[in-house]
Image (cartoon, rainbow, N blue to C red):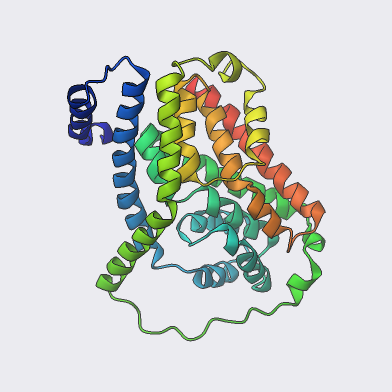
Amino acid sequence: MVATVFEPWQAVVDWFVYGVLGLSPDSAVGSALNFFLFDTVKIFILLVVIIFAITFIRSYFSPEKTRAWLAERKGSTVLGNVLAALLGIVTPFCSCSAVPLFIGFVEAGIPLGVTFSFLIAAPMVNEIALGMLWGLFGWQIALIYIAAGELIAIVAGLVIGRLGMEKYVEEYVYQIKVGATGPAGEAPTLSDRLRDAWACSLDILKRIWIYVVIGIGIGALMHGWIPAGALAEYAGPDNPFSVIIAVLIGIPLYSNAAGVLPLVAELTRAGVALGTALAFMMAVTALSIPEMILLRKVLKPQLLVVFIGVVGAGIIAVGYLFNWIMG
């Protein structure tokens, strides 16, 4: 469906690159430029549509409402993990908000495992990842990725919750009183929500556009100069260690979905198995160094290591599962 919608734009790009500029479709420069122009416009259009839709839905939630809602249902652990992972998709989140959200959840009495389900899902499964995955791989892969990310968040939260590691949360966290939210003001109208969703969408795009352009630029260079299938021998589905290596490489890196997804798309074209490439992306977005540094402020090293280990193991498992399904 997406490919059909953008066929006219592909025709325009082909006319400009191969007709006006006179570049050959078989040349590295022509292929790279065509890829860059087509994918840049396509991905930005999809991002605008999907970010707007999710930020509109997000207007009915807030970190405070999420915290209160989960606190009311903290008696059901499994249901709490599922709800927390789902709310992670639509609740505003960035690495800098990890610590205050964690403290707020703990202060509200939300179980530790449920809190981690939210913290894992929020950065890994978001509107930017959905929009770019849809544009680069199609809606089927986008939905499978979301399902896999949610599964990792739920299972990892359940495991951490069962380990009973509350004592490895820094003591001061339990002493902080976040306080209840004040009385709700007048509910925004539908036009208010639409206007705010549009403003928020533009704000998000202003913050990520450079990462998108750089990511697509790197992808374009790979598209033009690295032959299809060139990396299959080293990172294809037949290499039993490719997923583990991809996750270990991804953990120390820092990027967001906007910057890493065009690279993931080109890695798959170059022969890297899809599960391996997506595992790399998950490791980069869910286990980034800035977020780990921030979480260290509220987690003792033992719990932080368990968090990285459990999430990393889940990502590796999903990577192998993807490779098996796609193989």
Q: Does residue 2 show up?
A: yes
Query: Residue at the location (54% across, 24% down)?
Result: 323
Query: Residue at the location (50% across, 39% down)?
Result: 260
Figure check: 190 above or below 201: below
Query: At which x and y percent is residue 253?
Result: 62, 42
Figure check: 173 above or below 85: below
Query: Residue at the location (53% across, 30% down)?
Result: 277
Judged from this view, the residue extending furthest toward the front is 21
Does residue 302 appear left or right of residue 194 in this picture?
right
Figure check: 226 above or below 296: above
Query: Residue at the location (21% across, 34% down)?
Result: 9
Q: Does residue 144 show up?
A: no
The residue closer to the viewer here, 207 or 311, is: 207
Figure check: 157 above or below 142: below
Give the quarter of the figure containing the N terminus. Answer: top left
Query: At which x and y percent is residue 276?
Result: 57, 28
The residue closer to the viewer here, 47 or 38, is: 38
Query: At which x and y percent is residue 96?
Result: 59, 62
Does residue 255 appear left or right of residue 292 in this picture?
left
Number of numbered discs on residues: 0
Query: At which x and y percent is residue 321?
Result: 57, 28
Choose top left, top right, bottom left or bottom right for residue 84: bottom right
